[in-house]
Image (tube, rainbow, N blue to C red):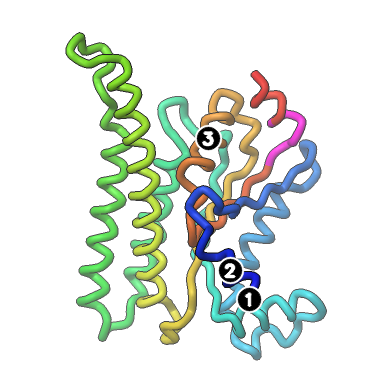
Amino acid sequence: KRKWDSIKGKISLNNICNLIALMGERGSGKSSALASYQGFLTEFSEREKSDYEYLTGNNRKLVELGNKKKISFITLDIMAATLLDVKENIIEIILARMLEKLEEQERSVRSHDAQSGKYESSQLKLKIGNIYEVMHNKPKEDSWEVEPAVVTLKALSKSWNLRKEFQNLVEEYVKYFENYGKSSDKSIQYYLVISIDDIDVNIMKSYEMLEMIRKYLMVPKVITIMTADYESLTAICKK
């Protein structure tokens, strides 16, 4: 514990390592493993003791640990990288899935929390919309009034600001689920789980998706899980 206390203050946004990669050749069962693991995380802290009496060994220990540590997960539907359109990016799809999950949670908010819950969800929707708009607000590089260096600096600033905005969104997003989740225990800590399947198959978008994961998703309270063929992914990154 003393060792952890001595280093935790030095951890910055650039030190977050929250990526779980399931690697294997085509047909090795990566997608099935991802679906199974995500399903387990979905129920990780929601099981009552009577619900997991049938579990044995490591599975039972994990569920008991989840209850003891008061941990729960917000699992977005698995995103198939192969279905990503040329004009779309993975962050847009994530924002859309976050909005879907938020609206789903809205419908289950307890009646006595309805008013405050509705206000907080509306604020989250505005933040999701603002981030989407920022992503599409590209600087005019063809303008003769703007120096190329200025355009580059603006792009760097936009990238960093977008990272901070997404981090702030995640913090408030998980806080909403902590306040209005299924459990009345406000001490439960929530984490957002983002799963991307077959990230190497969409050759035109694979490298871009990896860069967006690095830039925007490696922030606190986010767990990213992806599947890929290591050899294919390495070849794409070398091009």
Q: Secondary structure at mark 3?
A: helix
> What amino acid type should be assigned to the residue bearing mark 1?
Arg
Q: How would you classify the magenta stretch by its main secondary structure?
A: helix
Element carrying mark 1: helix
User: Where is residue 138 shown, x and y percent of the image?
Assistant: 28, 27
Answer with left or right where residue 121 lies relative to residue 210.
left
Measure the C-alpha gap from mark 2 to mark 3. Answer: 31 Å
Which residue lies under the disc numbered 3?
Answer: 211
Name above or below for residue 112 compared with residue 75.
below
Q: Nearer the N terminus, badge 2 or badge 3?
A: 2
- Front disc: 1 or 3: 1
The C terminus - image quarter: top right
| Earlier residue among tags 1 and 3 | 1
Circle 2 or circle 3, nearest the eye = 2
195 or 167, nearer to the observer: 167
Q: Which residue is mark 1?
A: 2
Compare residues 164 and 173 and report the one nearer the observer.
Answer: 164
Identify the amino acid type marked 3: Glu
Image coords of residue 214 (percent x, y): 53, 41
Q: Which residue is mark 2?
A: 6
Name the spot of residue 155 as percent of width and height, x first.
Answer: 34, 29
Residue at x 56%, y 57% (from the top left corner): 223
Looking at this view, name the residue that lies furthest to the top: 144
Q: Position of residue 115 (x, y in %)?
A: 20, 77
Task: Choose top left, top right, bottom left or bottom right for residue 25.
Answer: top right
Q: Secondary structure at mark 2?
A: helix
Pick out the residue farthest to the left: 145
Q: Which residues are magenta?
A: 228-233
